[in-house]
């Protein structure tokens, strides 16, 4: 059916996606924790609702724009896993908080002040997750400074500390499953230790312990006290997860269908998917910008409209006019470049899925 698509196109195997949804839902249930997936991977209300159908208790978004899109489609339990600051954003948060159960995240008093002001104006409790650094060294403080922060946040009348959260994004850089398991355990243990320290020093009970990242989620969570996980990539999977040894090619639900447009020599072929289709973000992928499915070669480099495959005698196996499937190295930014996904089942197109939250970076 590949020749049915005008290329380049993002195509989605609905059966594989649904299998991925079942797998992660089962992992969460077996670990005894809630699943709150991050929709930044697909940015589609249709797929977010599918995740809820398969057992998710709510969703995670990165930005208010994504939350606004999801809210319009009836999703009412949303975590914004990003600090919200600035008058315009606080006005939008206020509007959302009137309609849905919105949880925000922070790692500073300054952000807490704005959240509290929204709560004061609405006369409504505003739930927050406090982000803790467990090794990525992005947002979040260490245990001791988190305790100090929570002590100050506790003075805000309309701020309720619902949970502690982290994102172990450094898991994408691991070399083997042993390192991955170590990070998975470490992120949970560090959050639980922080929760315990807050209770000991401040007498404050924090009910939710929320961990993130698909790689650590695939390892399962054996740490007692973890209550929630927020994987995103698992819905489609990608080349990085193949490289980590967590999944196989057959587990990748989304591929880029692309046409070979040139073969300048026997060691180089060109496809019509460049950096405007395949993201130039490598993520944790080390061998190029996408794996050509069933060909055992990678997209070597990108210009805006050209994907270049350089490999010994690659031209002997790939011909001009041939349609190939490419598994993206990092699927999240790849999807954000597209208007729609073409969903198919058993070799037939079933639906066109709009990426309604694409570009919602505010």
Image (cartoon, rainbow, N blue to C red):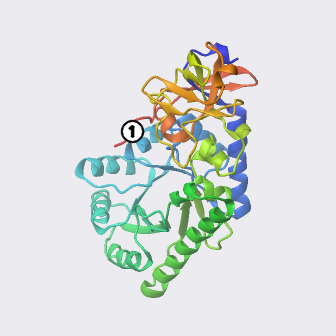
Percent of width and height locating residue 79: 47, 54
Residue 269 found in image quarter: top right
Q: SS for tag 1?
A: loop
**Residue in the image at 49% along x and 44% along y:** 40
**Residue in the image at 49% along x and 77% along y:** 194
Q: Residue furthest left?
A: 87
Would residue 85 be found to the left or right of residue 343 on screen? left
**Residue in the image at 73% along x and 41% along y:** 19
Of 201 and 116, nearer the camera is 201
Percent of width and height locating residue 27: 71, 56
Q: Quadrant location of the C terminus? A: top left
Does 292 sit above or below residue 8? below
Q: Check disc 1 and report the residue beneath it.
A: 360
Percent of width and height locating residue 310: 57, 29
Does 351 sit above or below residue 16? above
Q: Residue furthest bottom?
A: 200
Would residue 220 be found to the left or right of residue 276 on screen? right
Percent of width and height locating residue 168: 53, 61
Q: Quadrant location of the N terminus? A: top right
Q: Residue furthest right?
A: 346
Of 21 and 315, nearer the camera is 315
Of 181 and 205, nearer the camera is 181
Residue 326 found in image quarter: top right
**Residue in the image at 59% along x and 18% along y:** 260
Residue 160 found in image quarter: bottom left
């Amino acid at each position: 059916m590949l020749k049915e698509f005008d290329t380049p196109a993002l195509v989605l195997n609905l059966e594989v996606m649904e299998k991925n949804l079942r797998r992660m839902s089962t992992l969460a249930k077996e670990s005894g924790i809630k699943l709150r997936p991050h929709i930044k991977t697909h940015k589609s209300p249709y797929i977010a609702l599918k995740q809820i159908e398969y057992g998710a208790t709510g969703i995670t978004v990165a930005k208010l724009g994504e939350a606004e899109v999801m809210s319009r489609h009836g999703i009412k339990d949303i975590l914004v896993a990003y600090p919200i600051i600035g008058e315009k954003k606080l006005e939008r948060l206020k509007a959302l908080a009137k309609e849905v159960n919105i949880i925000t995240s922070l790692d500073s008093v300054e952000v807490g002040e704005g959240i509290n002001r929204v709560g004061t104006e609405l006369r409504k409790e505003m739930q927050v997750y406090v982000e803790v650094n467990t090794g990525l060294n992005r947002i979040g403080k260490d245990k001791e400074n988190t305790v100090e922060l929570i002590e100050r946040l506790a003075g805000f009348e309309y701020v309720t500390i619902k949970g502690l959260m982290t994102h172990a994004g450094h898991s994408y850089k691991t070399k083997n499953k042993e390192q991955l398991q170590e990070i998975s355990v470490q992120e949970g243990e560090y959050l639980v230790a922080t929760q315990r320290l807050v209770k000991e020093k401040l007498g404050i009970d924090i009910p939710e312990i929320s961990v993130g990242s698909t790689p650590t989620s695939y390892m399962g969570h054996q740490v007692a006290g973890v209550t929630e996980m927020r994987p995103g990539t698992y819905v489609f999977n990608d080349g990085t997860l193949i490289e980590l040894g967590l999944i196989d090619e057959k587990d990748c639900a989304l591929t880029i269908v692309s046409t070979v447009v040139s073969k300048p020599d026997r060691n180089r072929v060109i496809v019509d998917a460049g950096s405007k289709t395949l993201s130039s973000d490598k993520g944790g992928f080390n061998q190029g910008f996408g794996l050509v499915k069933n060909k055992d070669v990678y997209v070597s480099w990108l210009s805006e409209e050209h994907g270049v495959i350089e490999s010994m005698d690659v031209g002997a196996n790939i011909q001009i006019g041939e349609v190939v499937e490419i598994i993206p190295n990092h699927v999240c930014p790849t999807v954000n470049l597209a208007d729609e996904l073409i969903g198919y089942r058993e070799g037939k197109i079933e639906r066109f899925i709009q990426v309604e939250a694409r570009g919602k970076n505010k």
